[in-house]
Amino acid sequence: MAKNLKVVTIGEILVEFVSHTKDCGLSQVGDYSGPYPSGAPAIFLDQAARMGAPTEMIGGIGNDGFGRAVLDRLKGDGVGTKGVTVNADRTTGVAFVSYYTDGNRDFIFHMENTASDHFDVPEDAFDPANTILHVSAASLGNPRMRDMIVPTLRRIDDAGGKISCDPNARPELMRDEAVRDALQEAIDRSTYLMPSTSDLGFLFPDMSEDAAIEKLLASKAEVIVIKRGAHGATVVSGGERFDFTGHSVEEIDPTGAGDCFGGTFISLLAQGASLLDAGTQANAAGALAVTRRGPMEGNSSPAQIAKFLETQRSENVA
């Protein structure tokens, strides 16, 4: 792959508050921590920037403490932020999350009609022909953001740029015909597709995993990544296939791990890395992401990933 492609995301910028009590369902009084910088596109891009790719975040924050917390984090980690709109009339979006002992999560989002979905896409924020636009399907569920994401992905694809997509096929999103149509267009135009195993179940309920991969590769997609959570990942492209086993770590907060994986993988490909190297480091980054409370707190640097992989190798040898 040609080097120096800019990685761009468009979508929600949030702060998140995390309950320290499991099984409370966000309905009981308890201790929370936050505000943690969040939003799937922002988590992805923060990790992409930490891995060395040039980036540009397009989204909105309020002119408030929550907005400053996220913006300071993004800038501090090297994310390009001239595409971030600071809205004086609307507050920064907020999410609340609590966990269950079986691994499930409850979310409450305060995002619609906040600064999170009131922003513009600057025409000069990127060169369409030299851009990888990453699309998170969760962002397509918001009509205002969808109306900005879809024309932009068409513009980039038509100019010869590349599209990356995390289908994130949540059941509540898939019931919306407009979301399904937008997601299908993003999938059809993508060079890089990174579904989870559950995404494949929603998108191709009557197909085996191998058949679903073949169907995706028969379209424009050149690289398919199957994210398996704690069980690792699989990367398929042409005649190549790499299966990465999961790393044994103490899970504290899984939110954002898939975005961290994707940000690492796409950032490294944008810089010319091989599929094996990108997959190895992304698999490690996803494992590191779950070891810290807060969706962006577990994002990692190349040095941290290298140290983690060396430790894992030493433990396996021992």
Image (tube, rainbow, N blue to C red):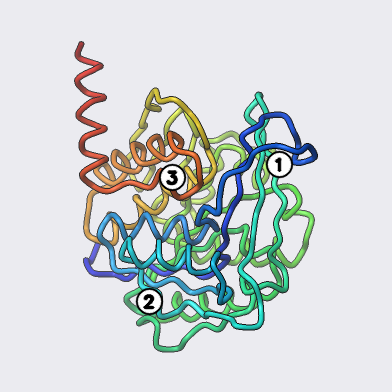
From the viewer's perspective, tell me whether residue 54 is left or right of residue 68.
Answer: left
- Determine if residue 284 is in view: yes
Residue 225 - label: 3
What amino acid is found at the position of numbered circle 1 in the picture?
Answer: Asp
- 302 up-or-down from 149: above or below: above
Q: CA distance from mark 3 to mark 1?
A: 26 Å
- 68 up-or-down from 253: above or below: below
From the viewer's perspective, tell me whether residue 24 is left or right of residue 21.
Answer: right
Residue 41 - label: none
The kind of secondary structure element at disc 2 is: loop
Judging by the rendered image, the residue that carries numbered circle 2 is 160
Nearest to the observer: residue 185 or residue 170: 170
What amino acid is found at the position of numbered circle 2 in the picture?
Answer: Gly
What percent of the width, then of the height, locates residue 208? 59, 34
Q: Nearer the viewer, mark 1 or mark 2?
A: 1
- Determine if residue 146 is in view: no
From the viewer's perspective, tell me whether residue 202 is left or right of residue 290.
Answer: right
Query: Which image quadrant is residue 116 in?
Result: bottom right
What percent of the width, then of the height, locates residue 2? 23, 66
Check whether the beta carbons of the residues at disc 3 and disc 2 lie within 8 A of each other.
no
